[in-house]
Amino acid sequence: MLNELYHIATPWAKATKSQINVNRMLGVAANVLYPVYCAWSPLPKQKTTPGEKMVVSLTTFPLRIGKVHLTIQSILRQSRPADRILLWLSKEEFPEEAQLPENLLRLKERGLDIRFCDNIRSFKKVFYTAQEFENNVIITADDDALYPDCLLYTSDAADDLIGADL
């Protein structure tokens, strides 16, 4: 679903004023339609992939905790699945896992790994993940974005190209 909206949108750097308005309307449409899509469209079964392990890491804070499940669902719907999805939460902001929204906790059954740590703001998603998964490909995600299903596939292909002998 998100792929179709991304294909209609014009890159911001090249957009005219009218195209920017269309992009904004597409963003509003995505914010309204994507939760409905997620509610009615089951998540695909996660499959393992050969090769390097790909870890997606993100963090959030109290104002966004109610909607971060949508970002994570867009990551779980990737054509190239992540080997691990980590959500780093501050122990100070979220003292108990039981206080987290149910729609977020349900995603643990699909592979979401919720970790609690000291609050170093947005650096949590990089700092702690890099310490534990230093030999993996790490992709950081924003908690307020919805990702098209080709994000990890494209990242994997770019990594192959960068690592290739030229």
Image (cartoon, rainbow, N blue to C red):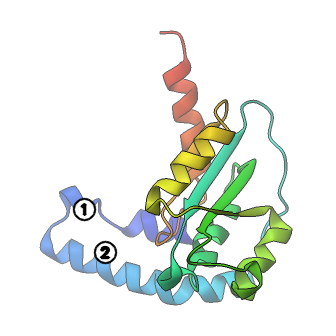
The residue indicated by pointer 1 is: 12
The residue indicated by pointer 2 is: 23
Where disc 2 sits, the SS reads helix
Above or below, 137 relative to 124 = above
Three-letter amino acid code at the position of disc 1: Trp
Q: Residue at x 48, y 84 (%)?
A: 63
Q: Residue at x 24, y 62 (%)?
A: 12
Three-letter amino acid code at the position of disc 2: Asn
Q: Residue at x 54, y 87 (%)?
A: 33
Above or below, 112 relative to 61 = above
Residue lying farthest to the left in this orientation: 17
Above or below, 61 relative to 63 = above
Q: Percent position (x, y) of residue 83? A: 75, 47
Q: Percent position (x, y) of residue 92? A: 57, 74
Q: Residue at x 61, y 59 (%)?
A: 149
Contact flag, marks 2 and 1 (Cβ < 8 Å): yes
Q: Percent position (x, y) of residue 64? A: 50, 81
- Separation of marks 2 and 1 at Cα, in angstroms: 8 Å
Mark 2 or 1, nearer chain start: 1
Judged left or right of residue 6, residue 92 is right
Above or below, 78 relative to 54 = below
Figure quadrant of the N terminus: bottom right
Q: Is residue 106 visible?
A: yes
Judged left or right of residue 26, residue 17 is left
For the residue pair 95 and 143, the one nearer the viewer reads as 95
